[in-house]
Image (tube, rainbow, N blue to C red):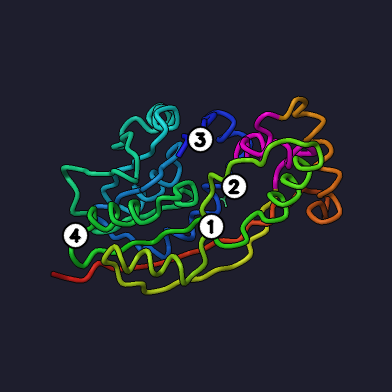
Amino acid sequence: MAAHQWNPHLYDTRHAFVAAYGTDLITDLDPRPGERVLDAGCGTGDLTDALRATGAHVVGVDASPDMVQRARDRFPDLDLRVADLRTLHLADADFDAVFSNATLHWIPEAPAAATALAAALRPGGRLAAEFGGQGNVAAIDTAARALRAEQNLPPAAQPWYFPDIAEYSAVLAAAGLTVTGAWLFDRPTRLEGDDGLAAWVRMFGSHLIDGVPHPDAFLAHLADRLRPRLHHSGSWWADYRRLRVTAAKPAA
Ligand code: BEZ
C-alpha cells in the first residue's frame, strides 16, 4: 500500500469534523478511569486527548510521523507513537480497550490490522471502531473516475477499504474477536467552504487527481457534476457511509 501523504495543518484547519464525529464512538467504548486504552490511528490527537479526559491511560499510535509530530506539539504529555497498524507490536500491550476512528478504511490489509489490534487487547478486552463502510463516498469516487476516463487518463488507484457488515465481521472473527455490535449508516458530512469538495479531494482523495495535468480545472469540473447531488443548504456534503463495530476478545 502506498502511504497516503498527510498535511497535519490542513487536516486540523479544514477537516476538524473527523474528530468531532468521533466523540460519540468514545461513548460506545465507554472507557473507565484507570483503564489502558489504545487509540489506533490517533491523527493529530484530538480524540486521544478526549479519551484521556475520561480518566483512561491512553497510548495513541499513527503511521504518519507528521501527524504524530503535530499531535505531540499539541498534547506534549500524551503517550504518542509512530506505528503501522498492519505490523503493530507494542511491548506494553495488554490494553483493556482499543479505539479506532476514521483509520481502518486506509488499510486494505484488513486481516493484518485486525489481528494486530486483537493481539493488543488483554483477554476480555473490547474494541470500538468506526470507518468508511460499503458505498462510502461512492458519488465522489464514481464521478471522479468517470471524468478521468472521459479525459483518457489511466484508472486511479484504490487505496480505500470500505467493507460491509458481513465482510468485516468475518475479518474480526478470524482475528479471534467476537462481534458485539455492527451498524452501517449514512452520515452525510458537511465540507466547509465553497471549495469544500475540492479541498476534500486534495486532502483525502489525491489518488483521484494523480496524473491529472490541470487539477484545478478537473476539480472545478467535478464540482459542477456533483453540485446537483452533493451541494444543498448552502454547503457541500460528502456522501459518507460509516461502518461502526464493537467487539470483544474472549476471556482466557
Ligand atoms: C471517511 O472518513 O469515510 C473517509 C475519509 C477519507 C477518505 C475516504 C473516506
In the structure shown, which secondary structural element does the residue marked by tag 4 occupy? Answer: strand
Rendering quarter of residue 118: bottom left
Whole-Å distance between the Cαs marked 1 and 4?
Answer: 27 Å
Task: Please tell me which of labels 3 and 4 falls first in the chain.
Answer: 3
Residue behind mark 2:
17
Residue 211, how many percent across, how many down? 68, 29
Q: Which mark is residue 4?
A: 3
Check the picture and name the quadrant holding the C terminus: bottom left
Name the residue at 31% across, 33% down: 77
Mark 1 beta carbon near ligand 1 (under 8 Å): yes
Compare residues 163 and 64 and report the one nearer the observer: 163
Instruction: Indicate whether residue 206 is drawn in magenta.
Output: yes
Residue 172, how many percent across, how many down? 35, 65
Nearer the observer, disc 2 or disc 4?
A: 4
Residue 84, how many percent across, how many down? 34, 40
Amino acid type, residue under disc 3 in the picture: His
In the structure shown, which secondary structural element does the residue marked by tag 2 occupy? Answer: helix
Amino acid type, residue under disc 1 in the picture: Phe
- How would you rate the neighbour count of disc 4 (Cα within 10 Å): few for under 14, some for 14-19, many for 20 or more? some
Compare residues 11 and 2 and report the one nearer the observer: 2
Mark 3 beta carbon near ligand 1 (under 8 Å): no
Residue behind mark 4:
122
**Above or below, comparing residue 33 to residue 8 in the picture:** below
Residue behind mark 1:
162
Magenta span: 191-211
Nearer the observer, disc 3 or disc 2?
A: 3
